Amino acid sequence: MKSSILFLIAFLHVSWCFSQTDGSVKGTVVDANKKPVSSANLMLHRAADSVFVKANLTSEEGQFEFENLKEGSYFITISHASFDAYSSGNFTISPENQTVALKEITLTSTSTTLQEVKVTNAPKPFVERKLDKLVVNVENSTLSAGNTVLEVLERAPGVMVNQETSINLKGKSGVIVMIDGKPSPLSGTELITFLKGIPASSIQTIEIITNPSARYDAAGNAGIINIKFKKDQRQGFNGSLTLTYGQGIYPKPSASTNLNYRVKKWNFFGSHSYSQPKNFTNFFINRKFFEPNGDLNSTFEQISYTKHFISSHNSRLGIDFFSSDKTVIGVLFNGNWNDQSRNGNTNATITNPNGFLDYTTQTSILLDENRFNGFANLNFKHTFNSRKELTADFDMGSFDATSIQDIENTNSNPDGSLISANKLATDQTGTINVKSIKADYFHSFSEKTKMEMGAKSSWVTSDNEVAFFDVINGQNQLDPERSNHFIYEENINALYTSFSKEFTKWDLQCGLRMEHTDTKGEQLATNESFSRNYVNLFPNVVVNRKFSETNSLSLSYAKRIDRPTYRQLNPFKVFVDSYTYVVGDPTLNSVITHLLELNHTFKGKYVTTLSYSKSKESITDIFVQDDVTRISYQIPANIQDFEQYNLGIYVPFNYKKILISTLSGSVYLNQYSSPLQGGNLEQDFTSWDVNLSNSFALGNGWTAELNGYYQSKMVWGLFYIKDLAQITTGVQKTSKDKNSTFKFSITDLFQTNHIAVVVDYQNQDFFTDRTWDSRVASLSYTYRFGKNTVARARQRNTGVEDEKRRAG
C-alpha cells in the first residue's frame, strides 16, 4: 500500500507541473445594485476579425476567467436573459502583459422582466444511440411507473436478465453493473435482488457501454451497464416526490423522493426510495437420469412455486463545497437496506422408463435474508484552467449479509406411504470490505488534442462463513463436512494513459492500462489455500474516418479481463431444493478477451456495427448430474474458447413532432469449444434480437408509449435459452405547470417474458421453464417542487470501479 500511495503523490506532483498557464483575462460582472450576476454567458472574440475563441459562464460570485490565451488582441461579449447585451473594449495579451484584469462590468436590466424561467426537457426516445454508448431514457418514460430497475433493464437492447442468477449482454456474460459510475458491490442473486428493490422512478438513464476506454477498469468483457440516479441541478431548494402502486398477482407499492438545496458555495443533495414488492416464481424442471450404458433409468419432473417478499430502502446523501471557482470537495454516501423472505414448495415425481410412478418428493424451503450495502466517497476536483483538470477519489464501504434457510424434504411411495423424511438448516454470514483510492488528470493541449492519465489502487477482503445443521428431533446438529469458512483477499493497482487527436478527416483515440493483481484465498475448514500474482497490459485504440458530412467509419480494438466474482469463487452450497444446489469454485481463472469493432454512422444517427470477440477460458455456468443420487448442481467453469460475431443496427425515426421511434437489433453467432465432463463441447448457434420503442405526443400534456422486444433462441455455454418476448404500453399526463405527472402502464402485456432452458450434453437431458409475476398494471404520481432556475451540474464519479460489481 505504501508504494501505491507514493506513486499517487508523485502522480499529483507531475499533474501540478503540467498546470503552468499562458496569458489570461479575468473580471467580475455585477448588476446596477452591485450584486454579482451568476450564469451570464461570456464569449471571447479575436479583435482582428471578431472570430469566436472561447465561451464561459460567470460563477455565483459573478467572476470569470479565460486562460491559455495566445498573444493578441481580444474583446468579450456578455449575454443574460435578464440584462441587455454587453460588449467590452479591446484588450491585449503580450509577454509584458500576460494577465489582464478588467474593470468591474455592470450590466443593465432589460425593460421586460421574465417572471419565471423554466427548463423543460424535449421528448426523448426510450432508446438513444450516442457515439460511444447506448442510452435508455428512463426518467420521462411512462414505463418507469411501477417498475423496478431490473424490469426496465430487461427491455434494454441486447440485455437478457435471468431472474435469479445473472445479466448477459449480447449473449455474453462478464457485464459490469455500475451505479452512478461505480459498480454495485454485488453479483449473481445478490445483484438481482438489489435491482428488484430499486423503483425505476428513481432512475434518470441507463447507459450501455460495449467498448470502454482505458480510463475504465479493464474488467468486463461484455461491457458496462451504468445506472444513473436522478440528479437535481437547480439553485435554491427543490425536489420531487413519486408515489407508485403496481398490481400483478401481488401488489408492488413504492415511493421515492429527491431533494436538493444549493446556495452560494454549498450544495446539499439526497434521495430516498422505499419499495415493498411481492412476487412469485413458477419453476418447472424435467430431467432424465441414465444407466452407465446410456439407457434411461428414470425421469424427474418437478414443479416449484415460491413467494418472494422484499422490503428495500435505498438512500443517497451528499455535500459539495465549492471552495473556489476552480476547486470542489464532495462527500457522498450510498446505502441500501434489504430484507427478503422466500416461502417455496416443490412437488416432484420420479417415474421409471415405462412411465410408472416410482416415488414422489415434497420439499418446503423457508429463507430469511438481511442485507446492508453502504459505501462512502470523498472526492476532490480542481480545474487549473479550461484545459487542465485533476480529480481524486477515496472510497470505502462494506456489504454485509446474513441468511437463514430451512429445508424440509419427504419421500413417499406411490400409495402415499412415507419412505423417508429429513430437515436441513443453514446459517450463513458474509462481509465484503472495499477500499479504493484513485486520481485522474485531464489535459487539453488544444480543442482537438487531449490527454488523460490516472492511477488507482483497491483492496478487497471477502469473509464468508456457513454452518450446516441436520435437524434431528428438533435439535440442530452441526455437519462439519458441509460447513465452511472462506476468506478471500485481493489488491489491484492500475496505471493508465489515454490520448486523442482530431484531424480534418481522421480522429484517433488510443489508450493503455496496466493492472497488477495480487490475490489469495483460504478455506479454513479444509486448510486449502491458493494465491495468484500477475500483471496485464490492456490497450485500447479507436480510429475514425469522416468520408463526408453524412458518412463516417470507425474501427476499434480493446483487450479486457473478466475476473471471477466473489460469489463464483465462494465454495459454499446454496440449495434451491433438496435435489439441486448452486456452488462456487475458488480455482477459477480470469478470462482475457480481445474485442474488434467496426462502426458506420450515416447522417449522425443511423448506426451499423460489426464486431468480433474472442475469449480464452471463458467463465460460464455448467451443470453436473449424479445419476445415482439424482442430485444436480450448478457451478461456474472455465470453458476453454468462446467466439462471437455480431452485426447490429440502430435506426431512429421521427414523424413531425408526433412520433419518436427507435429500432435497434442485432444478429450474433456464439461459438463454444471445450473438453468438458469427459466429452468435447461444441456449441455453434446464430441468434437475433430486436427492440422497437415508440413515443407518441398526443397534445395537451398527454404522451403514450408502446415498446416491444424479442430475443430468439440462443446458446450460452451448455445451455440453449429459448426465445422470449415482451410488449409494454403506457400513457402519461403532465400538468400545465409541469409540476405534476400521472402515469399508467402495463408491462409484459401478453405474459411472453420467461426463461426456458434446454440442455442435451453427455448424461444431461433436461428442460426448465421459469415464469414470474411479470404482467403488472401500475399507476404513478410525481410532484416536483422548488425553484426552477438551472445551475451548472457537477458529475460525480467515484473510484470503486470493478470491485463492487464482483461482490456477493
Image: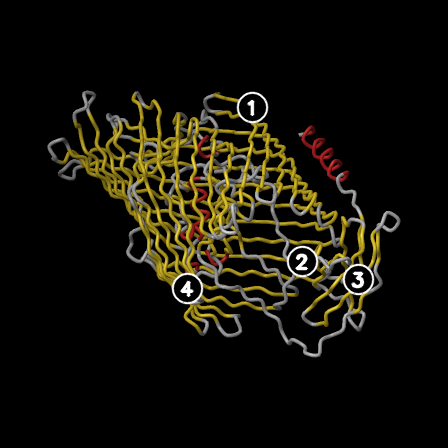
| Quarter location, residue 720 | top left
Gap between marks 3 and 2, in whole Å? 22 Å
Q: Which of the two residues, 298 or 611, is positioned nearer the viewer here? A: 611
10 Å crowding of disc 2: few (<14), some (14-19), many (20+): many
**What residue do we see at 72% from left, 31% from top?**
6
Amino acid bearing label 3: Thr
| Quarter location, residue 214 | top right
Amino acid bearing label 1: Tyr
10 Å crowding of disc 3: few (<14), some (14-19), many (20+): many
Mark 3 = which residue? Answer: 28
Gap between marks 2 and 1, in whole Å? 43 Å
- Numbered tag placed on residue 656 in the rendering: none
Mark 1 = which residue? Answer: 534
Sequence order check, earlier mark of 2 and 1: 2
Q: Which of the two residues, 570 or 716, is positioned nearer the viewer here? A: 716
Q: Which of the two residues, 361 or 390, is positioned nearer the viewer here? A: 390
Sequence order check, earlier mark of 3 and 2: 3
Amino acid bearing label 4: Tyr
Sequence order check, earlier mark of 2 and 4: 2
Q: Position of residue 649 (x, y in %)?
A: 40, 47
Visible residue check, residue 203? yes
Tags 2 and 4 touching, CB below 8 Å: no
Amino acid bearing label 2: Asn
Mark 2 = which residue? Answer: 267
Q: Could you tell me how many numbered marks the image carries?
A: 4
